[in-house]
Image: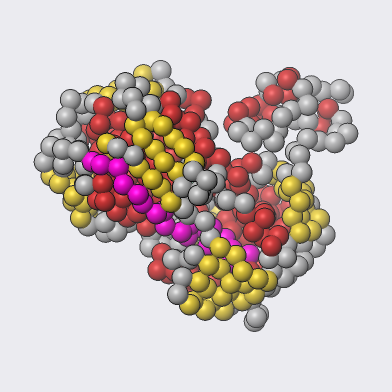
Amino acid sequence: MFVIRGGQPLAGTVSVSGAKNSALPIMAASLLAEGPTTLKGVPDLVDVDTLGHLLRALGSRVERLPSGDLTFEVQNTRANLADYELVRRMRASVCVLGPLLARRGAACVSLPGGCNIGDRPIDLHLKGLTALGATIRVERGYVIAEAKRLKGANIYLGGPFGSTVTGTANVMAAATLAEGRSTIEAAACEPEVVDLGNYLNAMGARITGLGTPFIQIEGVERLTGVTHTIIPDRIEAATLMIAAGISQGDIRIENVRLDHMTAVVEKLREIGLTIEPSGNCVRVRANSQLKSVDCTALPYPGIPTDVQAQMMALLTVVSGISIVTDKVFPDRFMHLPELVRLGASIRREGNCAIVNGRHHLSGACVMASDLRASAALVLAGLAAEGESVIRRIYHLDRGYDQLELKLNRLGADIRRESDEPKNMPASLILNVSDHAEDLSDPTHELRGPTWLKRLGINQRQD
Ligand code: EPU
């Protein structure tokens, strides 16, 4: 857990790590390559480790070099099982489906199951791969996909909430080795999809239309391993910008692609932050009265759903009514009641949260439910008066590379402690079974006081 003493305006310089959501599909696509792949700028995250485990289980050699680069090389192409234990920990594991099918002709990948940010089906991934000629069945919780050689096709990937980012990644990666030409309509335009496409093209793929909803792929016979640098993480950059705003700070952020963040920058300026780009750096200051705004998360180039929770945290301390809407994940509001525990005034209506901003939050004990919710609670903790305790912070370690160290270097006061409840009566240790993910807590932060608790059996003393 984090113990945060709020109230310090942040100041200084910080650098953004490589993008998690680029690194994961690109790592998965390394399964397509003949020869070694080297990735530069891969963030040091639990999710990266989890995918590394999966790739090893699928026959790849995976190594982190002293330089921080990651190398991959397929050594054995017989394995094609992505087991439930790994996929349920990290949904992006599903990105191995397309590459396995295209290169090995068969894949058996666990369905990811439920998630704290809402319903996350993979029907569009399966629709796209089926259109490429795969036969797909779902049995005992696994997707079993087979195809001798995939065949180019026209595929429409639009769904009720727009396109699908990892679905586009899966289908695009698979189509690179298909026979003939494929087109993906309603493709995701996110910079992470473009980064994957650039990596595939460097390996020998023939993809055009990246960054638009119409992607064309001319199938090739083989792809060869290359060296590729992951783009900077636009979600981390946005989180740091919001940290400057919520703490009334003045910071310089390095390794930023502002061209990937136009909607976020525009919204933060509307709120009243001063944002001054220079090269791949940006200075962010909160030197005037901040204003309430309405903010809607949309597919790229809109404001990302992965920034919605952090924006909401900022708006809780800005006077006036703000409406925050999420049109990508309409149920992604688990952070809302926790922000309320910190003193925020927020009401949910469907896919909207109505924030009645005030100047004052006060420290409290709160619980992180997912990666971006954790970030929002850390931001709120920076602004809250007194001490905030944020539990289940292992969610944050899945997707932010040393966020607390970066914030502490900017003057924040964040201490990492064990989540172990100290002297807490067993009657207060409730319902661990509601959070099955904790049982495989990859960072072992929750190394429990008793096996009973780990198994979800609640011991009451009353
Ligand atoms: N959807 C469908 N059918 C599908 C796939 C998606 O209906 O087959 C729906 C989803 O339920 C959702 C919307 O389409 O309402 C968009 O989902 P998408 O498939 O784009 O999400 P994803 O690919 O599973 C990636 C990121 C998420 C990010 C979303 C949206 C990775 C590894 N994950 O997920 O990142 O929120 O795109 O931008 O790239 C995070 O980093 O915290 C995170 C959750």
Q: Position of residue 390 (x, y in %)?
A: 72, 48
Q: Residue furthest bottom?
A: 288
Quadrant placement of the N terminus: top right
Residue 294 visible (yes or no): no
Residue 306 visible (yes or no): yes
Does the magenta run of residues contain 279?
Answer: no
Q: Position of residue 271 (x, y in %)?
A: 57, 74
Q: How is the image coloured?
A: secondary structure
In front of the other: 461 or 374: 374
Range of magenta residues: 223-243
Q: Residue at x 41, y 47 (%)?
A: 39
Q: Residue furthest left?
A: 180
Q: Residue at x 77, y 22 (%)?
A: 450
In the rendered view, would you say 10 is above or below 24?
Answer: below
Does the magenta run of residues contain 229?
Answer: yes
Quadrant placement of the C terminus: top right
Q: Position of residue 318 (x, y in %)?
A: 65, 70
In the rendered view, would you say 295 is above or below 25?
Answer: below
Quadrant hosting residue 446: top right
